[in-house]
Image (spheres, rainbow, N blue to C red):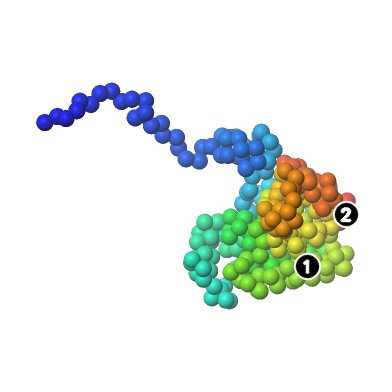
Amino acid sequence: MTWFKKGKESKADKKIKIPEGLWVKCDSCKEIIYKKEIDKNLKICPKCNYHFRISARERIRLLVDDESFSEIDAGLSSTDPLDFRDKFSYRERLEENRKKSELEEAAVSGEATIAGHPVVVVIMDFSFMGGSMGSVVGEKVVRAAEVALEQKKPLITVASSGGARMQEGIFSLMQMARVSAALARLSEGGGLYLSIIADPTFGGVTASFAMLGDIIIAEPKSLIGFAGPRVIEQTIKQQLPDDFQRAEFLLDHGMIDAVVDRRELRRTLGQIIGTLA
C-alpha cells in the first residue's frame, strides 16, 4: 500500500554542498573571506590587514633567504618528568601534537641568512600545544643565544605562545629565568637580539624573551600580554579599551618599537641588521 505520493523536491530538500575549508572567518573584522585569497596574500586579511597565524615552516620561508635555513637541535623532544595526567597523559598529548603539527616541539631553531646577513633564528609554532614553552623550547632559545654569541651573529626570535607549559610545572617556569640569563650574556657580549611578536603571545613567553629584544617588532593587530583582558578587568574592576593588548596599543604606549607588516618584515630585518650588527 502506498501511503504518500512523492512529489518534486522542494528547495528546502535540496542541500547545497559546499566543500569545507573554502572560506575563512577573520578573527579581527569577522568577515568571511575566500581562503585562496588569503593564501595569496601571505595569510593576511585583505579587509582589515589582520595577520593570521602561520606555521613555523611557513614563517621560515617568508623570513629568511631562499634555501639558507639549516636547522639545529632538531632532535630535542620533550619527556614527561612529572608523569602528568589530566584528561589525557602528557605523553599522549605530545604524540598527538607531533602528528598534527608535523613538528617535534613548539619551536624550530636554526642558522640562516636574511638579506645576505648570517643570523640565528628561533621560530615558535602555535599549533603545537598553543606554542607553550616547556623545557625543550627554553633549551632551544638558550642554545640559539649561545650560538649567536659564539659566532657573533644576530639572534632573531619569533614568539607565538600561550605561555608556560603547565604539564611540566616548575621545569617550564624555570625556562623564563634560563632564557633571560642567556640573553643577558648575549647582550653583555655585544650581541644583537631582535624579537618579533606574532598573534597571540602571552604568559611566560611575554614575561621573558619576547620582551627582551634590543628591538621589539610586532605584526599588525597581534594580541600581546601576560594575563588575558577578562582577568585584568575582573582584577582592577575597570573597563579596558577595545584595542587593549593589540600591537598598535602597545606601540602607542612604548612597550614595543615597531609594528611591521609581514610582507615588509624580511626587508626591515635586513635593514636593521645591516645598520646595527
Determine which residue is flagged by label 2. Answer: 276
Q: Position of residue 61 (x, y in %)?
A: 66, 49
Determine which residue is flagged by label 1. Answer: 180
Tell me which label, 1 or 2, sits earlier in the chain. 1
Q: Nearer the viewer, residue 171 or 186?
A: 171
Q: Nearer the viewer, residue 151 or 132?
A: 132
Q: Is disc 2 placed on a helix, strand or loop?
A: helix
Going 67% across and 43% down the picture, which residue do you hit? 51
State the mark number for residue 26.
none
Give residue 235's quadrant in the image. Answer: bottom right
Q: Position of residue 122 (x, y in %)?
A: 70, 59
Q: Is residue 95 above or below residue 221?
A: below
Going 84% across and 49% down the picture, which residue do you hit? 253
Q: Position of residue 139 (x, y in %)?
A: 69, 69
Mark 2 surroundings within 10 Å by alpha-carbon count, few (fewer than 14), some (14 through 19), many (20 or more): few
Q: Position of residue 260 (x, y in %)?
A: 77, 44
Q: Is residue 13 above or below residue 105?
A: above
Give residue 129's quadrant in the image. Answer: bottom right
Q: Is residue 62 above or below residue 32?
A: below
The answer to whether the residues at label 1 and label 2 have Cβ atoms under 8 Å apart is no
Q: Quadrant of the N terminus?
A: top left
Foreground label between 1 and 2: 1
Amino acid on which the number 2 mark rests in the picture: Leu
Gap between marks 1 and 2, in whole Å?
22 Å
Going 48% across and 67% down the picture, which residue do you hit? 88
Left or right, 251 with respect to 86, comes to right
Query: In the current view of this chain or complex, which residue is farthest to the front?
Result: 237
Query: In the current view of this chain or complex, which residue is farthest to the left?
Result: 1
Left or right, 106 with respect to 214, comes to left
Is residue 93 visible to the viewer in this orientation of the structure?
yes
